[in-house]
Image: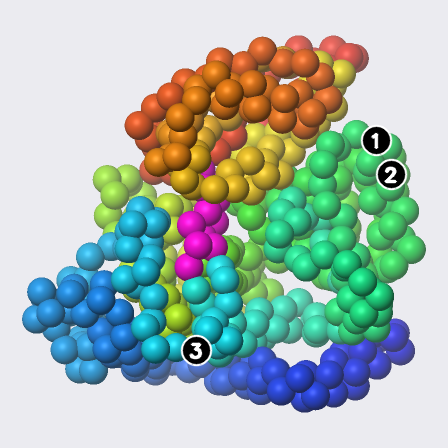
Amino acid sequence: MRFSDYAASRLLMPAYRKLKRNPSARYVRHVERVNAMSLEEIRAHQLGRLRAVATHAVQQTDFYEDIFKRLGIRPETMTWEEFAELPVLTKKDIREHREAMTSRNMPRDRLRESATGGTTSSPVGFLTDWEAVHHRNSATIAFNKWLGFLPGMQAAYLWGARQDFEEETGLKQRLLNRMLYRREMLFVEGFDDEAMQGYYERLSRVSPVLLQAYSTPLFLFSGFLLDHGLRLSIPAVSSTAEPLLPRQREVVEEAFGVRVYDWYGAREAGRIATECSEHNGRHINAYGLHVETVDCGLEGGLGEILISDLWNIGTPMLRYAIKDVGRLEEIPCTCGCALPRLVEVVGRTADTFINRAGRMMPSVVLTNRILKDDRLIREMQVIQEDFDRFRIRVAPGEDFNNEEEARRTLSVWLDHFMEQQNEIVLELVNSIPREASGKTVFCRRTFDPAPNGERVRKEP
């Protein structure tokens, strides 16, 4: 281990957290104790936390007080069978009842503004209490230790959502990042040889211990490295945001010479599940979450994923439908860990757009770029039908009132993003239809460019 990584992770970061009275590091031990439990002990921990959150929710929110009263369930003695009777919580519920879902008597300085993810629907705001944020961060630290990474070690992020990280707006932020957080941010825009050469040079310069990336950009960058005979010595590589397809995994692992760790998360819940060294499904963060699947008419054991936060009492979220589909398994992993595993997650893929010049534009970047306010556009889907022809489906929000203005605005935005003039067809719809997987997809390309020297072939 380099001295700079040792000093920041073992000395400076612990001292800084102690100074700021940040308990995240202390909670890591609690996460690891849960990770080492039997399945029976894990379920007991989860039920105890669900009872605690539900009791607070009934006492402090009109929304849950009404639900538990109507069902005749006492939250402090709630059983698993009674928990399963709670209605599924949707983004629509949060949008329409966010005030009634928010804890009444919690001081404002104990709450942090949060938002749901925006894969198809616009993000919806809610509140997370800071204690829950610390518990969530501790789980991320604990699972990253599986990769050999500790906070303070040099990390690089090949990322598509700028809002996930605070902007370095002043000298203090820049110094903190250089000395403590040590993050090199590579926000993906277009993907051509010049951009990827720049990523390669920056990664070579900072030599990170961990490269964390959106799956599609990571796959494209790995292909660039292989095509140009370039190597990077990065001990840990992790992927997220989209399912990592088998072919993509092969290319990434060939390019970096290490096994890639895939993890599944969401803005509503933080780190949900992470691969272990066996790479046989993602282990659930049972310390901070209860994850279940419910039947949605699909075969192969696939069900709609529901998340219950075991710590957030700012806006309690019980049985929240995260709009993904997956398959859970409770058979112990060969690594010896009894944590349940998500062995399959489907519905979070996003195609790569291609402009007429042949430049690849990872559409996952769009996920949180366009939809900023659900009052204007509630849901949207962008479909590339040809190099410069797009169909955009929009489910209007309550403040949407001008179709032609929306078409012009979207046209200007898309021309800028694709670096060309485009033809767009705007369709106003009541909602975005689900795919066969049960997922509503934000972006899709419906054509394959001809495999000649001027165009790029769509990867399988």
Residue 81: quarter of image: bottom left
Mark 1 or mark 3, which is nearer the start of the sequence? 3
* 207 left or right of 298 in image: right
Mark 1: secondary structure: helix
The residue located at (59%, 39%) in the rendering is 369
Query: Looking at the picture, which amino acid does disc 2 mark?
Result: Gln
Quadrant containing the C terminus in the rendered view? top right
- In x, y percent, where is residue 354? 66, 22
Q: Which numbered circle lies on residue 193?
A: 1
Q: Nearer the viewer, mark 3 or mark 1?
A: 3
User: Are discs 1 and 2 less than 8 Å apart at CB?
Assistant: yes
The residue singled out by tag 2 in the image is 197
Query: Looking at the picture, which amino acid does disc 3 mark?
Result: Pro
Dot 2, how many residues are within 10 Å of its Cα: few (below 14), some (14-19), or many (20+)? some
User: Are discs 3 and 1 less than 8 Å apart at CB?
Assistant: no
Mark 3: secondary structure: loop
Query: Which of the pair 247/204 is nearer the observer?
Result: 204
Is residue 114 visible to the viewer in this orientation of the structure? yes
Q: How was the colour assigned to the protein in this rendering? A: rainbow
Looking at the picture, does residue 33 appear above or below residue 255? Answer: below
* 182 left or right of 355 in image: right
Dot 1, how many residues are within 10 Å of its Cα: few (below 14), some (14-19), or many (20+)? some
Mark 2 or mark 3, which is nearer the start of the sequence? 3
Query: Which of the pair 413/233 is nearer the observer?
Result: 413
The residue located at (28%, 78%) in the rendering is 56
Dot 3, how many residues are within 10 Å of its Cα: few (below 14), some (14-19), or many (20+)? few
The residue singled out by tag 3 in the image is 107
Does residue 123 belong to the magenta stretch? yes
Residue 420: quarter of image: top right
- In x, y percent, where is residue 92? 31, 47
Looking at the rendering, the stretch of residues picked out in magenta corresponds to 115-126
